[in-house]
Image (tube, rainbow, N blue to C red):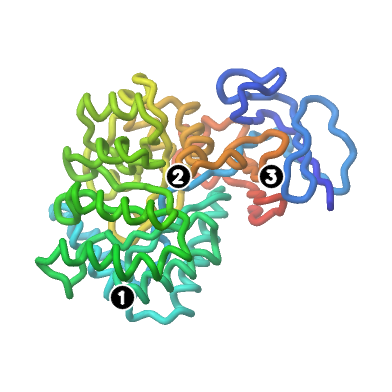
Amino acid sequence: MTTTVVDHVGVLVTNDDTTSGGDGALGILTDAHVVFDGPSIVTVGTGRAPAADQRIDAGGRCVLPGFVDSHTHVVFAGDRASEFASRMAGRPYEAGGINVTVGATRAASDATLRSLAAARRDEGRRAGITTIEIKSGYGLTATDEARCLRIAGELTGETTFLGAHVVPPEFADRADDYVEHVCREMLPACAPHARWIDAFCETGAFDADQCRAVLDAGRAAGLGLRLHANQLGPGPGVALAVEMECASADHCTYLTDADVAALAGGSTVATFLPATDFSTRQPYPDARRVIDAGGKVAIATNCNPGSSYTTSMSFCIALAVRDMHMTPEEAIAAATVGGATALRRDDVGRIRPGSRADLVILDAPSFTHLVYRPGVPLIATTIEAGEVVWQSP
């Protein structure tokens, strides 16, 4: 394999608090280098770098682990720009708008969906995202959900069956019948193409009993569990996610004291999606409460056409610091190792020997610039599994 060294790193965020000489929970090293052999990191150190087949000069800039985006919906057709404009004029966000995208996605060819999803994935790489989770949820038939998952599987191993996204028009006013259809007909067709199963536990989507049925069926089929929870108001989603030991409860916009205590006492990661709250004008989650209680947190983009059409993790980090009361260090951790934890991965989100060689070189001396200079494209280079997949001109 080809050995590559990234050297002259001014500030290296390893997210490894066991790193020799590393500073703080982020395991920060200065005057650092990283060596990887093919797709895997073999050496992390400071001072003079060892010889290698290839050299990438970081030029004294900051280097981070690649961002881990643990919640997206990038396989879809059409857009909902008019819905967004109406919302900005005063109409509130409603879960039922998902069916607009369902219609467009069902009508699109495989080639169209594949091209659109690949373009969004490449856009994410330009934003420093090296690991991505992709959900289905815009087909809502066995055939369409399975094909969306197959297309997602061409882009990532982190695929999620979200048949319980919303009740489709053909099952209007028959949510229980649709849930049974998800479990009996859709799941067998989709499980071979998915690692995870998810459901939207929310008014206008599915209640706790319906979500429990979907998650139970998914677990029996060998899938890991995730859950959309507490986005539009207080509800049972977070408690259900913790009880069922879901890997993550996503959104967590409205949290009671009991929800916070449950997250702190369980293994479920609270995944915050601040670009969604920006786009829907919902309140931002109080991440400070969860962090101070000892809960595990992640940040993800929730890239989708209705409530968060962005692939910019940098934007989400800036929102988390500005409006969710996180420190820059906490937000960086949440967008890297936090996302990895939400995906139950220990090979990404950190820069340490044995991890996948996923690195982001910033065009900045410090990660704080992602918040300090919001909206400025600061991703200079993205390295994924040892390969440069994006480099700014």
Residue at point 48%, 62% (across, down):
120
Among the two numbered marks 2 and 1 on one chain, the one whose residue lies closer to the N terminus: 1
Residue 316 appears at what percent x and percent y? 41, 42
* Helix, strand or loop status at disc 2: loop
Q: Quadrant of residue 52?
A: top right
Residue 178 appears at what percent x and percent y? 20, 66
Q: Which residue is mark 2?
A: 375
* Helix, strand or loop status at disc 1: helix
The kind of residue tagged 1 is Ala
Mark 1 vs 3: CB contact within 8 A = no
Q: Tell me if 391 is positioned left or right of 292 in this view.
A: right
Foreground: 359 or 205?
A: 205
The kind of residue tagged 2 is Gly
* Helix, strand or loop status at disc 3: loop
Q: Which residue is mark 3?
A: 357
* Labels 3, 2: front one: 3
Q: Tell me if 345 is positioned left or right of 234 in this view.
A: right
Q: Which mark is residue 350?
A: none
Outermost residue toward the left in this view: 173
Give the class, few, some or many, for how many residues have Cα within 10 Å of label 1's Cα (few <14, many ≥20): some
